[in-house]
């Protein structure tokens, strides 16, 4: 993966740790992830609860609330999970459900994920057992008839269930890693789920009385129900282990523009810093970001295509500047015009 977290956020993290609240986690996330406010809150609460879970000898056993993230590609699902793990400094490992489904040795692959978690915990078993595992693309595990592959998605769901239910897993060194305290976050685009949810709306179910908050009613009616996930192809036991659902929205033009500009490590900031190394000031007009965002929307992969379009635009500048010591400023006024290379003043 590309390195995208330049600089240190240790100071901010410390302040989060100073008084860790869901709000503090969200404020940390806000520095890197644009929009998705509802999902941020849901995940911050899940993480907060995860960290506050009492040891198992407590009088009330608090069940774990694993999270299912649903949203289109390139809307920040993976980014948000990675940022979440950094915000609270828990060991974090990711797995890709698609590659699990393509492997002949699913259990070994899953074990490898837990070993990565242990590695991230610096070998500390106790820390690893309170870590977070993010399993991406679980929508690709949907049950299908006549599965031609070695392992069907459904059997991967069963294999994952075991660790999500809290089974101890034997490690190569003979120790056991107890998965009961690990927070699992599963993500996927779930293309087609919207249609299922739309056809299963039960507006009569929620009685409306005057004074009911319409926004809350709308939210309840738009909920993804477990039955929708069964219809999509997840097995009931698997969805049963993912009681919390966070939805990510498609990114519109304005959010895409903000993504290029606002995050602490935004593309714009990165390239401004890059050119500053050459003693050159980079200025890009707002309209250029809107043009890039509009192109990105056409490509239909969320924020994923922003960087490529941006890099293509900036490449000639990065080529020319080192050849031309007199250039002190670069101004880009439109995606469809040559960048202007200017001397000082
Ligand atoms: N909401 C967002 N805020 C900031 N950057 C984003 C956002 N969504 C996507 N990106 C950018 O797009 C890239 C791909 O996003 P990612 O989180 O991998 O998408 P997915 O939802 O498919 O997991 C990220 O690395 C980031 O640069
Ligand atoms: Mg992803």
Image (cartoon, rainbow, N blue to C red):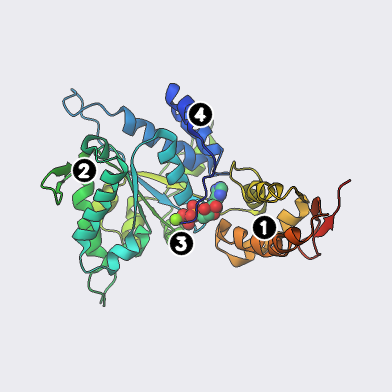
Mark earlier in primary sequence (2, 3): 2
- Mark 2 Cα within 10 Å, few/some/many (few <14, many 20+)? many
Mark earlier in primary sequence (1, 2): 2
Give the Cα separation between the discs numbered 4 and 2.
31 Å
Query: Where residue 253 sits in the image (x, y, percent)?
Result: 66, 54
Give the Cα separation between the discs numbered 4 and 1.
32 Å
Q: Residue furthest right?
A: 345
Q: What element carries label 3?
A: helix
Give the Cα separation between the discs numbered 3 and 1.
27 Å
Horizontal arrangement in the rendering, residue 168 relative to residue 231 (left or right): left
Residue to which mark 1 is pinned: 293
Which numbered tag is attached to residue 11? 4
Mark earlier in primary sequence (4, 2): 4
Q: What element carries label 1?
A: helix
Q: Is mark 3 within 8 Å of ligand 1?
A: no
Q: Is mark 4 on a helix, strand or loop?
A: helix
Mark earlier in primary sequence (4, 3): 4
Quadrant containing the C terminus is: top right
Q: Which residue is drawn at 33% across and 31% down?
A: 51
Residue to which mark 3 is pinned: 195
- Mark 1 Cα within 10 Å, few/some/many (few <14, many 20+)? many
Q: What element carries label 2?
A: helix
Which numbered tag is attached to residue 179? 2
């Amino acid at each position: 993966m590309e390195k995208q977290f330049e600089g240190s956020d240790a100071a901010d993290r410390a302040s989060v740790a100073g008084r860790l609240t869901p709000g503090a986690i969200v404020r940390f996330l806000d520095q890197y992830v644009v929009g998705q406010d509802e999902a941020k809150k849901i995940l911050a609460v899940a993480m907060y609860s995860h960290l506050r879970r009492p040891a198992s000898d407590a009088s009330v056993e608090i069940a774990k609330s694993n999270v299912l993230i649903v949203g289109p590609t390139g809307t920040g699902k993976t980014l948000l999970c990675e940022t979440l793990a950094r915000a609270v400094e828990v060991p974090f490992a990711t797995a890709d459900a698609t590659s699990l489904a393509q492997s002949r040795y699913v259990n070994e692959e899953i074990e490898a994920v837990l070993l990565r978690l242990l590695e991230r915990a610096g070998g500390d078993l106790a820390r690893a057992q309170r870590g977070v595992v993010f399993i991406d693309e679980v929508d690709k595990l949907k049950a299908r008839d006549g599965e031609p592959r070695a392992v069907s998605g459904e059997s991967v769901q069963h294999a994952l269930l075991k660790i999500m239910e809290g089974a101890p897993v034997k490690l190569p060194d003979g120790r056991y890693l107890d998965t009961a305290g690990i927070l699992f976050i599963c993500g996927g685009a779930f293309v087609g789920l919207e249609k299922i949810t739309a056809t299963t709306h039960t507006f009569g179910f929620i009685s409306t009385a005057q004074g009911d908050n319409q926004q809350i009613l709308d939210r309840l009616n738009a909920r993804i129900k477990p039955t929708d996930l069964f219809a999509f192809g997840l097995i009931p036991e698997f969805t049963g282990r993912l009681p919390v659902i966070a939805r990510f929205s498609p990114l519109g033009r304005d959010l895409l523009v903000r993504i290029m500009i606002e995050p602490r490590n935004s593309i714009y900031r990165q390239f401004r810093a890059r050119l500053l190394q050459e003693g050159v000031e980079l200025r890009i007009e707002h309209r250029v970001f809107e043009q890039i965002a509009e192109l990105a929307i056409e490509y239909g992969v969320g924020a994923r295509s922003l960087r490529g379009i941006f890099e293509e635009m900036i490449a000639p500048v990065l080529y020319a500047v080192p050849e031309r010591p007199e250039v002190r400023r670069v101004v880009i006024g439109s995606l469809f015009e040559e960048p202007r290379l200017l001397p000082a003043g």
